[in-house]
Each structure stands twice: as structure tokens, then as C-alpha cells.
Amino acid sequence: MAASILRPTPTLSIPCLSSPLPNSLSACAPFRRTSPSKCSALFGQIPDDLFQNALRVDESNPIFPFLQHGLSQIDRFTAELPENERWGVFTAAGIGWVYLTARPGVLMGAIDAYILAPLQLGFDSLIGRRNLTMSDFVVGERLGEGSFGVVYSGAIVPKNFPAEERLGNTKRRLETDGRFKERVILKKVKVGTKGAEEFAEYEEWFNYRVSRAAPESCAEFLGSFVADKTRLEFIKGGKWLVWKFEGDRNLADYLKDRNFPLNIESTMFGRVLEGLEPIRRSALIIKQIMRQIITSLKRIHSTGIVHRDIKPANLVVTKKGQIKLIDFGAATDLRIGKNYVPDSGLLDPDYCPPELFVLPEETPTPPAEPIAAILSPVLWLLNSPDLFDMYSAGIILMQMAVPSLRSTPALKNFNSELKTAGYNLNTWRQCTRSRPDLCILDLDSGSGWDLATKLVSERSSLRRGRLSASAALRHRYFLLGGDQAAAVLSKLSLSR
Ligand SMILES: Nc1ncnc2c1ncn2[C@@H]1O[C@H](COP(=O)(O)OP(=O)(O)OP(=O)(O)O)[C@@H](O)[C@H]1O
């Protein structure tokens, strides 16, 4: 239960009661640092994993010294007690520790809410991230429109840019204008649309939250601003959310192309995979995409977040072949019950699991946040809400691997056949009239097919019956890691 959070490390063990703590417990490695953030012109250099590192439980985690200190304190205070009472104290402390660190992580949630979030706020304010204004950006092409917002491409205005040119112009082709180096994505929250402001509040909150919990898995959030005058796309008082521009295309754009998955091969691996038949190449590309999607889901699920809108259009592909999650407006944080309303789902029917809701409909409205947090491990254990996203991941696997399922009408037909087949892919395979080409999934003794059947399935009466992200990554489909080798090789050749 606690395995995904409290990973055993070589040094993290309850010490022998009569002996002092192992010396190795005092060896705490410093934070690991990765490459700095790209949007440095406006915000300076920020390590991508600043907050992520603080949420791991190993020697590099800030919790580790607390654990070490706690153990030594218990050891000291119980030194006078008889041996069996000391065992009692250590067992109680152990059970408490397991509970507090079990998914979704009560202890780390408290650290995140009471230490990391205020730290992030202070840090962002210091570097000007929380003081954005509309004149910091130019607005370019309109990219899309959802129920609550309109999405534009845009750019950070360079210093010394003429004042009269500062505000947006939708006809501007920013990507071809050499003056704009730092491209962004701007979401204009609809003014006057019921629920839009609340939706934007949640989206902003979740973006800050995932930027601490899983920064490498999500588009980098730059902040928000409220327009102070009405001009072009801006409406006075209207709220805007801003992200770093992560890539030109999302997975849905790639899927629309007849040449998928070979059209994404050089983005994923930096080159064409030579010496392999096309079907093997396709299988490796799809496996690498699935590995990235499921790894990101594992990261967000381990901190209590369920995305609830996993679909190809919400997976942006970066130039370096990273798949980033976007659109957290429908996400829910089941550590504290944020954005969870019983009976209410915000769903794309094409990717939504048959249970429709992330928790059973009879689950009551969450209590106050600290109480919800304390109860969250029980809620998680009983309901496995993370399996909601795993179904959507399974549908994406089917769409990528089976060419005839890539169009929207074909996907709708597949979903209706699947419903008739009781959400059992094996039954669907026997009775479908669409004659799908399943050869990619059938490679390597059908490991892809086996994974798909364990993701696209109905839940059992115990709300299990589908693989979690951690279990999926241990599935034999991912164990034969040719895609990993190709990805590593491509990174090596790019860094040369
Ligand atoms: N950070 C980003 N980098 C690059 N492209 C992005 C980014 N964020 C969003 N996009 C592009 O904009 C599109 C719309 O974004 P998003 O899904 O957040 O908007 P939305 O209004 O919620 O749309 P919908 O409700 O239709 O999902 C995405 O499909 C993606 O192509």
C-alpha cells in the first residue's frame, strides 16, 4: 500500500532496539538538480525539480532527516522501558508512519500545503511570477476553445519592445517573428459563462500543485493575470492563465495523420529507428508514448490527483519527444477533496470509463480539508480512484495501436461495441464487425493486447479489476524495454 510513496532504501530501516541508529541514516544526500527552466527571461533560472525533490522519500528527501530524528528520539525516550514495551512503541510508530505515508500521502500533503506551497508563493513573488500583467504578453493565433476558455498561442514581450505594439493581435504569426523568443500559451477565461471563473480557479490551483508534485510531467505553468483594460482580445476584469509553450502538436494532432505512429518517430527518438521492420518501429514508438503517459499518471496519482480528462488532445508532445499533461480543469485532488463534487463528472464520453464517476456516487461531500486528508488513505484504499485515468490510458493505447480506431466516429463505434461486450476486450475481439488490425498489440506473445485488456475493463465489485499506473509499468509489455534503449540512445546522440 505504501510502496509507491515509502520506497525501501538501503538505509531506511527500524534499528535494532538495543543498538544505536545505523550511521548510514545520518547520511542525507543534497537535493538533486536538473536543467534549469526555459522561460528564464521573465522569471530567472529555476530548477525544474525544486519541489519534486521535496516529495520523495529517500535520503535526498527533506522528510528523511525528520524520520531519522524521530527514530532516534523514540529510541532515546524508550531506552528505560522494558523490551516488550519498546517493541509496542516502535510498532505503533511504524503503523502511524505507514498510514501517514500511504497513498495519497497525508504527511507529504501536509508538508506540501503548509511548507512547499507558501514557499512557492514567496519564491514566485520574489521573481515576479505572481505579478504578471496583460502588457507582459502578445496574443497570437487562436488554438482552440473549450466550454470555459479560449486558448491562444502568445509570447512574452521582450524588454524594450515598443509600447504601442505590446498588446495582442490575433493575426500575428509569432513563430515566424524572430523578436519573440519565449512563446507561451494563454487561456482566456470566458467572462459571463456560468462556472467559468470557478473552473479557472481550480485549473490555476491544480497547475501550481502539479508544478510542485510532478513538474516534469506537466506543461510549465507561468501564472495568471487579470486584464486591466478592454482591448482586442482582452476584456477588463477577465482572467487569463499562462503556460510555457511546450510544443506545436498534441497527440490527437499526430493521431489524425495517416502516417501515425511513424510521423512522431523522429520526435520521440531523435531519429528514424533503422534496421527494424515498420511494425516493430511502430510498436516501439507506441510503447514509448504509453510508458511516458503512464509514468506521468503514476506521479500525479501518488500525490492524490486524478486528472479525469486523459485524452490525446490533452497530451502535448514537446520538441524533445516528451509527452506533457495539460488541462487540469477537471482534475480532482482526493487527498483533500479539492474539485470533488459527488454525482458530478466532467467527462469526455469517448475516453471515460464505464463507472462515470471517480468515486462511487454515494460518497459524501468531503469534510474540511485536514479531516479529508486524514481519511484519504482509507478512501483511496477502498475506491482506487486512480483507476479512472487508467481506463482512459487503455483507450489511448487501443487508438494508437489499432489504425481503424483513430477517427472520432470509429472510436464512438468501438465504445458502443465495447459496451455491448460488457467492457471486455476479449469478448469485443470475438464479436466486433469492424475487423480491426491488432497485429501491433499481438507482437511479443500479445503483451500489448494483454495490457490493453487489463486497462480497458469494468471494475469489479471491490472497485479493482484494472491495473494501477505502478502495476501497469511492471507489466511484461514494458519489461521488454526496446523503446527505452532507443530513447536513451537518442538522448546520447542529441547531447553529443
Ligand atoms: N502548454 C502548452 N503548450 C503547447 N500547446 C498547448 C499548451 N497548452 C495547451 N495547448 C494546446 O491548446 C489546446 C487547448 O488547450 P486546453 O485543452 O488546455 O484548452 P481547453 O479550453 O480546456 O480545451 P478543451 O476543453 O477542448 O480540452 C491543446 O489541445 C493543445 O494543443
Image (tube, rainbow, N blue to C red):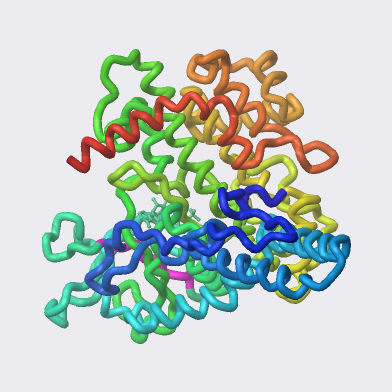
Quarter of the render that holds ligand 1: bottom left
Q: Is 188 part of what is drawn in magenta?
A: yes
Rendering quarter of residue 160: bottom left
Q: Is 343 part of what is drawn in magenta?
A: no
The residue positioned farthest toward the bottom in the image shown: 228
- Give the mark count: 0
Question: Residue 113, percent across and down?
Answer: 59, 74
Rendering quarter of residue 365: bottom right
Is 355 drawn above or below residue 245 in the view shown? above
Question: Residue 348, percent across and down?
Answer: 59, 47
Horizontally, residue 162 falls left or right of residue 477, namely: left
Q: Which residues are magenta?
A: 183-190
User: Which residue does the image show at 47% across and 30% down from the upper left?
Assistant: 400
Closest to the observer: 308 or 29? 29
Split into 4 quadrants, where in the image is the C terminus? top left
- Can residue 193 be seen by looking at this rendering? no
Rendering quarter of residue 112: bottom right
Question: Residue 56, percent across and down?
Answer: 53, 58
User: Which residue does the image show at 84% across and 62% down from the upper left?
Assistant: 83
Please name the predominant secondary structure of the magenta segment in the image.
strand
Question: Residue 187, percent across and down?
Answer: 41, 66
User: Which residue does the image show at 26% across and 74% down from the upper left?
Assistant: 42
- Can residue 113 be seen by looking at this rendering? yes
Is 448 drawn above or below residue 299 in the view shown? above
Closest to the observer: 319 or 34? 34
Closest to the observer: 182 or 351? 182
User: Which residue does the image show at 40% across and 73% down from the upper left?
Assistant: 223
Horizontally, residue 491 falls left or right of residue 470, namely: left
Is 137 drawn above or below residue 274 in the view shown? below
